[in-house]
Image (cartoon, grey):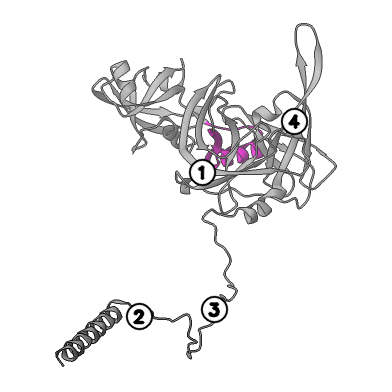
Amino acid sequence: MIKSKIFFLFLVVLLLVSACNTTSHQASTPTPTVNPTQHSTATPTPIQTPAPSNQTYTSPFPSIADIVDMVKPAVVYISVEYIESSFFFRSTSTKSGSGVILSPDGYILTNSHVIEDAEKIEVLLPDEVDTHPAEIIGTDSLSDLAVIKIDGHNLPTAEFGDPSKLRVGDWVVAMGSPLSTILGAEGGPSVTIGIVSNLERSFNLEDSAYYDVIQTDAAINPGNSGGPLINLEGQVVGINTFIIYTAQNIGFAVSASTAQRVYEDLVEFGDVIRPYLGVTLRTVTPALATELGLAKNRGVLIWYVEPDSPAWKEGLEVDDVITHFQGQEVTEASQLIKLLWQYEVGDKVQIIYYRGTEQHIAWVSLVERPEDR
């Protein structure tokens, strides 16, 4: 009897322990949200394929295709024959460059060095096979610009833009026939794009003085000289002139503010009529002021005075620092030159300058710039 009770109690304890283990296992085992062995009665959501978008991809960079199509017909290839002489022989050589048509009857603006010493000039228009003979209308060595003309009627043209609206960092497009002496003129003008790196540069390079030029990193290569520098409105803001061969991505174009006046004068007069002070100028910098012991570290330095020139007659001297021209403050040599070119021969202009620490005022009567200056 006692054994039966003990057995019964043992069986009850065993059942209770088994029940507790089962409950503990069920509570500690996470319940899956989806049982892979069961079929859900819910209707699965179908995978949605995105509908085709009508929006086109927008590049972060500007497209210049429309600009190229607009300006390209007016950009020409120029081939020049010239006589190359030495002590022992004399032979005919060729060189080439670019130009831009600015009038329907065939006036073309290019660089003076492109047509220098030319015996024969031929112009090839884009998408044409036959060349057009060209004549020289006028050259201007100071700005390195020239105008030539071909016979034409209703020719495609480009137009000048306003370079004063350019800012450093603006996109510009250089057009022309780079490496044309090597690759030929087939296919018409080529195109490069870059930004305006600097504005209103002025400097001396070899025997030439350059005023009012635009610096750009758009590739300007041999043969590109004389081609247009274009803004994103398809307007000519400069004429490609030269590159610094010892550096990368440093090219220069004569600003349209100078190029347009030179073009108009050459077409009308065959020469550029400029007012003349008779001085060579440099921009004053703190470093230059320290080097020369100048009292002013801001302004335009007179570097040289031509004897018997208007400036010489009014007593201006080397190392004088010009601070104002016609009431306007001047801090760059190129700025003063641009202001000067706004006046006519015979005008009298006011110049405020410093000699040491003393301020002086001169009234200078402008004359026509001599051809050899």
Q: Residue at x 55, y 49 (%)?
A: 231
Look at mark 4 in the image and give the residue it sits on: 181
Image quadrant in which you'd find residue 130: top right
Single out the residue that lies furthest toward the left.
Answer: 2
Dot 4 or dot 1: first in sequence order is 4
Q: Select label 4 or label 2 by which is in front.
A: 2
Residue 355 on the magenta span: no
Distance of label 4 from label 1 (alpha carbons)? 27 Å
Mark 3 Cα shell of 10 Å, populated few (<14), some (14-19), many (≥20) = few
Look at mark 3 in the image and give the residue it sits on: 47
Say what secondary structure mark 3 lies in: loop
Question: Which residues, given as a range, are shown in magenta?
Answer: 249-274
Look at mark 2 in the image and give the residue it sits on: 31
Query: Do the CB atoms of the residues marked 4 and 2 lie less than 8 Å apart?
Result: no
**The disc label shown at residue 195, or none:** 1
The picture places residue 159, in percent across and down from the top left corner, at 62, 50
- Amino acid at circle 2: Thr
Q: Select label 4 or label 3 by which is in front.
A: 3
Say what secondary structure mark 1 lies in: strand
Say what secondary structure mark 4 lies in: helix
